[in-house]
Image (cartoon, helix red, strand yellow):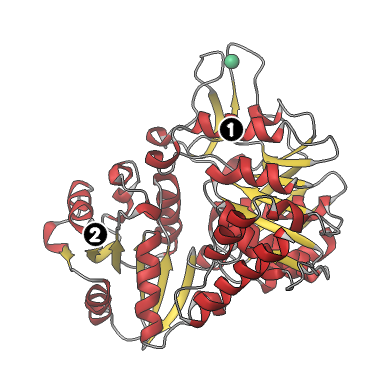
Amino acid sequence: MRYVVAIWLGRLAGLLSRWLGRGGGTTMPGVIARRVAPHILTHLTRQLPHGVICVAGTNGKTTTTRMIADVMIAAGWRVLHNRSGANLTSGVTTTVLMGADWCGRVAYDVALFECDEAAVPQIVRESQPRLVVLHNLFRDQLDRYGEVDTIASNWATSLQTLPESTVVLFHADDPSLARLASTLRCRTVGYGNDDVTSARDSVAHLADAGFCRCGAALVYTARFYAHIGHYHCPDCDFTRPLPAYAITQVTSQGLTGSQIALRTPHASCTLQVPLPGLYNATNALATYACADQLGMAPVVAGALTQMLAAFGRYEVITAGNHQLVIALIKNPVGASETIRMLVDAWAAPVQLLIIINDRDADGTDVSWLWDADFEQLCGTTQHIIVSGTRAADMQVRMQYAGVDRQQIECVDGIADALDALLVRATNGQEVYVLPTYTAMLELRAVLTQRGWVAPFWQN
Ligand SMILES: [Zn+2]
């Protein structure tokens, strides 16, 4: 009875907020239902014949989750997925709630949850996933979460309670995840990049997990980005575990994507990744490993070819005569990689808009701007417009990065900043926007008003 009341109240709140146009109603139904029936998530997910799959990580979890969803749909499963990006317990609960009928029956095969780092323990406890993907752990929004070690230890505590039948897929190139996996009693399966030619040398200032538990500094024979690479401890036996699923070769195809060769427990294969950069190659690898564990490896290649960039992380929008390329930036490692991916693909200096907000969902501490490699934009941009609540900080940051003061312009208001960007673009030219999360939402609202993009919950 309690569950039925919770479902009715939650679903009504969802329909009402959608009807009133108050965003997508992606968290409120869950909040309300959980207040009435705290175990509602367990109650509903227990009905799913193929159970729950959780994807956790600092970067790339949205894209990876989308890829996995597309693969499962291609395999014929009915998938409940928190596609709007609401990845706290309330958002996950909302997803299942809105997927249930008024009697609380859930007519889906599986639930796929992208999980916020801090919400992982609770979502795992309540939904008892059959498979968990641990993608990476970077310094991200420290003011909200605390250190990487704390998150890893919270994850470990909750994952240690899962039965032996659970599969935990982990990124073996991330030392904190390899260490975590070694403490679990369920089945752990690693994935990683064996192509050392895709490694870079100097990313020293981005080190997050540079030390072994014994206190020694980890030694890297190859480093892909930040602390992701081939590592070992010089003082004890801690070393990168040999991954069961590995990229053996990455061939970049610029902004359009890359081709990756894979070694798996069964065979070798080649995948076409429709999104650019080494990040996305790794996302595709995790997707393949997950699909193979579920017995759907044969449909991965086809599903990836069909896939478009995950909402907001990287997308191209036609804005009048111009192509607007929007790439989310939210933490130093992700921002540095995103900028590297873009700069790699630029044939000539571009027009750029950077929008930095410091609202709660962005992280209120903007000191991360100083850890991100904005130096790459020096000499690769024609003119940089900065906007958002912390536009002034970004302006100073770009000056320190070595960009000429004359080339940077501060514009208040995202609509005006967008106009200032577009007016500088020559016809048909691609122009670029790097927004933080809430800045991206505001930007999308402006684009929607102008009829250039649909609200995201209609996607
Ligand atoms: Zn050690």
What label sits on residue 154 in the rendered view? Answer: 1
- Give whichever of 405, 212 is nearer the camera: 212
Q: Quadrant of residue 154?
A: top right
Residue behind mark 2? 389
- SS class, disc 2: loop
Residue at screen point 53% across, 42% down:
118
Name the quadrant where ligand 1 sits. top right
Residue at screen point 32% across, 48% down:
364
Q: Quadrant of residue 453?
A: bottom left
Q: Please provide percent x and percent y for residue 420.
A: 22, 76
Q: Please provide percent x and percent y for residue 126.
A: 69, 46
> Is residue 105 shown above or below 199?
below
Q: Quadrant of residue 161?
A: top right
Q: Is residue 258 left or right of residue 286?
A: left
Q: Amino acid at mark 1?
A: Asn
> Is residue 263 shown above or below 414?
above
Question: Pointer 1: residues within 10 angstroms few (<14), some, or many (20+)?
Answer: some
What label sits on residue 138 in the rendered view? Answer: none
Of the numbered discs 2 and 1, the one sitting upstream in the chain is: 1
Q: Amino acid at mark 2?
A: Thr
Q: CA distance from mark 2 to mark 1?
A: 33 Å
Q: Please provide percent x and percent y for residue 185.
A: 79, 29
Residue at screen point 57% across, 42% down:
136
Q: Is residue 135 left or right of residue 423?
A: right
Q: Considering the image in quadrants, where does the C terminus appear?
A: bottom right
Q: Is residue 325 left or right of residue 420?
A: right
Q: Residue placed farthest to the front in the image?
A: 1
Mark closer to the observer (2, 1): 1
